[in-house]
Image (spheres, rainbow, N blue to C red):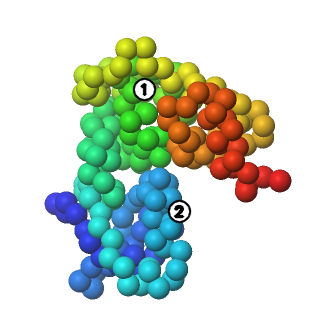
Amino acid sequence: MIGSIKGKIILKTDKFLIVETNGVGYKINVSPDTLTKLAPRLRSGQNEKSELFSFWIHTHVREDILDLYGFLERPELEFFEMLINVSGIGPRSALAILGIATIETLKKAIGTGDTSYLTKISGIGKKTAERIVIELRDKMGEVKEGSSLQGELDVLEALKSLGYGQSEAREALKKVTSDANTNTKIREALKILGGNKN
């Protein structure tokens, strides 16, 4: 099994990368969040050809498929592997879930049993969200008493009411100050989104 890959990125799409190492190009499926993190380093065409990138790899094998899923940080890989061990969650669904919020936010949602956050944010069904909470809640560690994600849901609803799509609103929310109040989060998110809408 492949556990990690270090090489040059020779192709980047919106869903996967081709990383070349020792003359072999590996197709690595990545989350939108990983692509966002890589973007500053890939802006110049020279970087794509010369810089070496390291990925933690999950090798997914089925009867007729061998897929690689890559992560820049080990905690992302570990959380991904927890998600795919939940019945009904495949690698692509797990990758999509990882793309909707930070790992800390997702762990808080699962740890507090906030299935409404999981369903409203990721679009997964209620039964699947409940299954994720039931199977992973004990693995999330201690969650602060009274922790709530309602504020984040309120920010997303406010941004959607202003005409922003759910995916761009989610991306902006990931970049705002996590401990700010709802109004501050909305203001920060609007500043981030300001360049996308006239």
Residue 12 vertical position relative to residue 71 in the rendered view, above or below: below
Which structural element holds mark 1? helix
Alpha carbon distance from label 2 to label 1: 27 Å
Can you name the residue that lies furthest to the top here?
146
- Residue 185 location, quadrant: top right
Quadrant placement of the N terminus: bottom left
**Residue placed most toward the observer, 192 or 59:** 192
Q: Residue at x 73, y 51 (%)?
A: 194
Residue at 62 percent across and 27 percent down: it is 182
In the drawing, what numbered circle is on residue 76? none
166 horizontally vs 131: left or right: right
**For the point 32% across and 47% down, which residue is it?**
76
- Mark 2 or 1, closer to the camera: 1
- Where residue 44 sits: x, y (%)? 52, 80
Residue identifier under label 2? 14
Q: Position of residue 11 (x, y in %)?
A: 45, 76
In the image, is residue 13 above or below residue 156?
below
Which amino acid does the dot numbered 1 rest on?
A: Ala
Few, some or many residues within 10 Å of mark 2 (<14, 14–19, 20+): few
Please indicate, yes or no, whether residue 74 appears anywhere in the rendered image: yes
Tell me where residue 19 appears, x and y as whole percent: 35, 74
Q: Could you say whether the residue bearing mark 2 is in a helix, strand or loop?
A: loop
Q: Nearer the viewer, residue 187 or 105?
A: 187
Q: Which residue occupies the extreme right position in the image? A: 198
Q: Is residue 177 left or right of residue 93?
A: right
Q: Pointer 1: what residue?
A: 109
- Residue 131 can be seen in this image: no
Q: Quadrant of residue 161?
A: top right
- Relative placement, left or right, of 133 versus 124 is left
Q: Amino acid at mark 2?
A: Asp
